[in-house]
Image: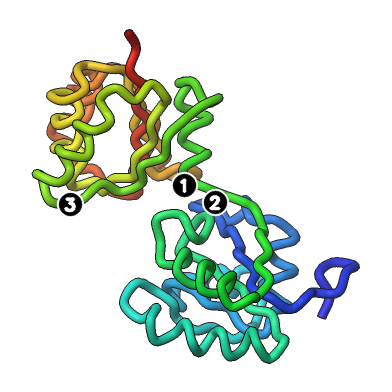
Amino acid sequence: MKEGNRELTPGLYVVSTPIGNLEDITQRALNVLAQVDLIACEDTRRTGILLKHFRIGNRLISYHEYNKLRRTPEILTVLKQGKAVALVSDAGTPGISDPGFYLIRVAIGEGVRVFPVPGASALLAALVVSGLPANRFAFEGFLPKREGRRRKRLTALVNESRTMVFYESAYRLGGFLEDINEIFGDRKIVVCRELTKRYEEVVRGTVCEVLEQIKGRDLKGEIVVVVAGYEE
C-alpha cells in the first residue's frame, strides 16, 4: 500500500474529516482512506456518504460509544496482523470529545504505531474566528448534562484566565449561557454554529447581548462557544 508516493506503514491512522464543507478534506486523508485495510467510523452511513462523494470504496465498521468495548479487540486483531486501520469520527478530528480516544489509548498500550492525519477541527475553527485571544486557551468540550454538575464545573473555572472553548447542543444553549452569565458574569463570548456549512453563523457580544440575539430562535446544528478568560 502507498500513501501518495510512500508506502503506507501498518498502524492506526487518526484521520480528520470535514466538519461540514467536503472540500476541507486533505489529499493525504483521501489517500489513506482509500488504501487502509479497514475504516472504523462512528456512523457507517455518514462516512459512506463521504467516501461515495470521493469515489472511494473500502471496508467500514462502526466504532462508537456504545460498542467500543466490543469493537476494540476486533480492530486490534487487524492491527496486529500488520495491517493499516483508519479511525474517523462523524466530523472533525477523532479523539476529541468522542470514543476514538479509547481506541487510540489501547492501541498505544499494545505497541501499535499511531499516525495523525491532520485536518478540520470545530474547536480550532471556532477559536480562530472568535477574535478572542488564541495564544493560550482551555478546551472543556461538553460539560455534564445535569445542571448541578455543569454549574459545579463552571464554578471551578471562574478564575481561568485563558480563553475557554466549549461544545454544546443547540437545545441546551440558552440554559448554558444563562449559567455562564450567573457564574462568570457578563463576559465577552462568541457562539459559532454550523461552521463551514450552508447556514454557518457566528454571534459575538457579551453573554447578555448574545442571549438577546438568539432569544426565541429555534437553533439547530453543532454549537461551539468561546468564552473570554477571567481578567483582574
Secondary structure category for the residue under label 2: loop
Please name which of the two marks, 1 or 3, marks the residue nearer to the observer. Answer: 3
- Residue 226's x, y, as percent? 37, 31
Q: CA distance from mark 3 to mark 2?
A: 29 Å
From the viewer's perspective, is residue 20 above or below residue 215?
below
Q: What residue is at 47 percent from the left and 45 percent from the top?
A: 122
- Residue located beneath label 2 in the image: 21
N-term mark: 1 or 2: 2
The mark found on residue 197 in the picture is 1
Q: Amino acid at mark 3?
A: Lys
Tell me whether the residue at label 1 lies in contact with that at label 2, contact meaning CB atoms closer than 8 angstroms: yes
Secondary structure category for the residue under label 1: loop
From the viewer's perspective, is residue 217 above or below residue 9?
above
Q: What residue is at 21 percent from the left and 50 percent from the top?
A: 144
- Residue 101's x, y, as percent? 47, 64
- Residue 171's x, y, as percent? 18, 47
Dividing the picture into quarters, in which one does residue 159 lie? top left
The mark found on residue 143 in the picture is none
Q: Amino acid at mark 2?
A: Asn
Please name which of the two marks, 3 or 2, marks the residue nearer to the observer. Answer: 3
Dividing the picture into quarters, in which one does residue 135 lie? top right
Screen quadrant of the C terminus: top left
N-term mark: 3 or 2: 2
From the viewer's perspective, is residue 204 above or below residue 200?
above
N-term mark: 1 or 3: 3
Label 1 crowding class (10 Å Cα cut-off): few <14, some 14-19, many 20+?
some
The mark found on residue 145 in the picture is 3
Screen quadrant of the N terminus: bottom right
- Residue 198's x, y, as percent? 45, 45
